[in-house]
Amino acid sequence: MRTLIVCCLLTAAAAHAQTSVEKPTQQPDAYNTWKLALNAGAATDPRTIEVPPGFKIELLRSATPEEDSWVSMTFDPQGRITIGCEKKGLLRMTLGTADISHVERINDSLLECRGLLYAYGALYAVANNTKALVRLRSSKGDDQFDEITELMHTEGGVGHGRNHVKLGPDGLLYVAHGNNVVPPPVAPDSPLRPMVDDRLIPCPWDPQMFDGDVKLPAGAVYALTPDGKTAKIVAGGFRNELDVAFNEEGEMFTFDADMEWDTGTPWYRPTRVNHVLSGADYGWRRGTSKWPEFFPDSGPTAVNIGLSSPTGVLFGTGSTFPQKWRRAFFICDWAYGRILAVQLRPKGATYTGTVEPFVTGKPLNVTDAAIGPDGALYFVTGGRRTQSGLYRVSYAGPLAMEPAKTPAEAAEERQAREARAVRHRLESFHGHPQPAALDEIWPALGSADPAIRQAARIALEWQEVRLWRDRALAEKEPVTSLTALMALAHCGSTDALAPMLARLAALPIETLKPEDQLLGLRDYQLAFSRLGLADEPTMAAVTRRLDALYPAADWRANHLLCELLVFLKSPSALPKTVALLEKATRSEDLLHYLMFLRNLTDGWTLESRRVCFTALNRADTLEGARDYQRSLRWIRAEMSAGLTAAEREKLGALVEGAVVPATLPNSGPQLVVQEWKEADLVPRLDRVSQGRSFEKGRLAFAAAQCAVCHRMGNAGGVLGPDLTAVASRFNRKDLLISVLDPSKVIDEKYRNTTFTLKDGTSITGTIDREDAAGVFVRPSLALPATTTLRPADIVRREVSPVSPMPPGLLNVLSESQILDLLAYLESGGNPAHADFKP
């Protein structure tokens, strides 16, 4: 009987029959067997996907092999679904009464269309690997796109490349680009002014620009006219904002990516929802130079999400959901298999928010979503050549009246509207001088609302400096003065330094509240990074003043003061920072203070050396990803090089580092069991679903050398991607194939580079770092050794099609060990997972 049920379900899946469920329930054995057997050709069944009470989720179609993997979707004016394929081309799907009734290919030339938009009688497509925004039209009116016009071409890489396009409330096209794209030519009246790093002490470890990667403005949002003839850069300083969306008030939001290698460092920025404001710099920089979100001249973060992988975003506007969900900002997370609902609420002229799950599943590698003409939410899964599916989420629960707003809530909304109106008025001055606007801009520089203050500062920076410089230097109200001085640092000339420092000296920074003190400290940082150094007496006076503030009660102020005082070579920088370091417990604080202490050469004592190496050893035991661990190694090497022979002898083993106990066993040399092929193992994947051994899977993770580069929970290496949530984005078959054939799909961050040298030889590896001295290439991720290449010796560099992860890793395992390993990966390191139950 069980065999009959499985066969019937397989037949239904092969025919792409609709499957739906209102609420996930415990599934019978027959269903589990069917679900896992479908790894070879069906998307995740909705009965394993969680949605809120009252909602129903349906699987409308699983992609067939010839339909590729799906990365984007939208609805056309006729209510049909257009889907962007990962490799090339576009599909059009017609909805029937219960599923997809018709599928056709409407383009077979555009490469990886990440963004799709129907507007102005055309289809706009952002074709990432074609490196262009194009417009598709039907010249014959026959529903076929025979006319393709390139509107904007860009160079650069395709990893964090050309992303989504949305229609703004102003009728312009808003295009999101990641930080690998070379910026296109933009209009001179673009709101975003040229960006700089603003780093007082550049770090020599920061990777330099190489093929496929660019510096500022990093990820950016562009506004284009429908014909593509005029482009303006609206905001920048993102890493890889895949998409943007507009709420009912016409405000723009995005979901920006983190750099997972930075986890644990003071420069780590979690994935986050940003309110995209005119002219704002959101602080993404290469390496250690990223701005912390507390910088007063950084664009606002509405809510930090944490570890995730941003893809499509949308508001619930136009859905038939209850009001709470209609106003929600839905963000798709590819890596952790979920769609999150961000409930935004006004915070002055900007927003803050809370987050809750809306759709979650394993795997559920969501790439894009859209509200359909029926008011349901549709989404697609796929990417990285994985199995794709098209789903629909609709509301089937009881209708409920929304409670009336309280007088306090109504007043808050009214105040927020008024604050946004003030901000919008100030933003109208961005991009071009308007001398008459100065009197309107000036009072807003001292606003208690940071978003209004930022809009006013950017507006001031667009006015001719000669018209407001003296006024800025004469202003006495502290916050207004500090904001105006920040604008002067951003766009003034070097002759503004001395009077700016004089004005700062006259302001009562010591008595200001912490947020305003940060404004003053950032002004000092900007003054020196942008305008240079003053005469020796002035610099000495600044040093004495800042020294009196250090240490502060606020850790943010301490981070700024530490950098400033080390830059100024204050004699007290070393003992005061060492004292802070001795008490530090957070990895971010430990690494921050160690980073700057390594720049000091004078004033060291044996005890201060002891505190630093003790802190390094403590930091070694804390959680941190690749760049955290790498930074600690480099700091240790620099600090060790500065020791005298006597100091080294007295500090002894402290210098060598902490002995961190292994969390996974070292299995030693392995013998080849069999050269495993896909055909050997795929038919056996259903055996992973029950009765596996957690402990044997953990041992197989070590035996196959997975733990050398990858983490699972708190165990393993940091050189490759963290595999704890890998089952949220890859089904069992895709996961197996990625191990058997690691070069089939390579994450851009982990690609090797092949260098051809003048002597005819070549070397392939990952770039550990690059500076004026050379390129430091690591031939093997499993080994710390690097090879230094002199720039003059390099003839050519090319991205390698071969993954750093070697093939054949499973060949040392038996079939049973491989199945246990897959269960271990699927469990995320959880011994209570269903795969381990009898």
Image (cartoon, rainbow, N blue to C red):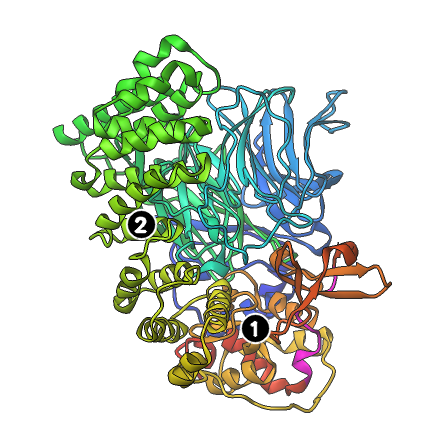
Is residue 660 in sight in this rendering?
no
Of the numbered discs 1 and 2, the one sitting upstream in the chain is 2
Residue in front for this viewpoint, 447 or 519: 519
Circle 1/circle 2 CB separation < 8 Å: no
Q: Mark 2 points at which residue?
A: 561
The quadrant in which residue 186 appears is top right
Q: Position of residue 205 (x, y in %)?
A: 54, 58
Name the element at disc 1. Answer: helix
Type of residue at label 1? Answer: Cys
Name the residue located 47 percent from the left edge and 49 percent from the top edge.
Answer: 289
- The stretch in magenta equals 800-811
119 is higher (above) or lower (below) than 660: above
Residue at 40% from the left image edge and 27% from the top image edge: 496
Q: Position of residue 391 (x, y in %)?
A: 52, 48
Q: Is mark 2 on a helix, strand or loop?
A: helix
Most foreground residue, 75 or 565: 565
Name which residue lies at 32% across and 57% down. 571
Magenta portion: prevailing SS class: loop
Judged left or right of residue 600, residue 451 is left
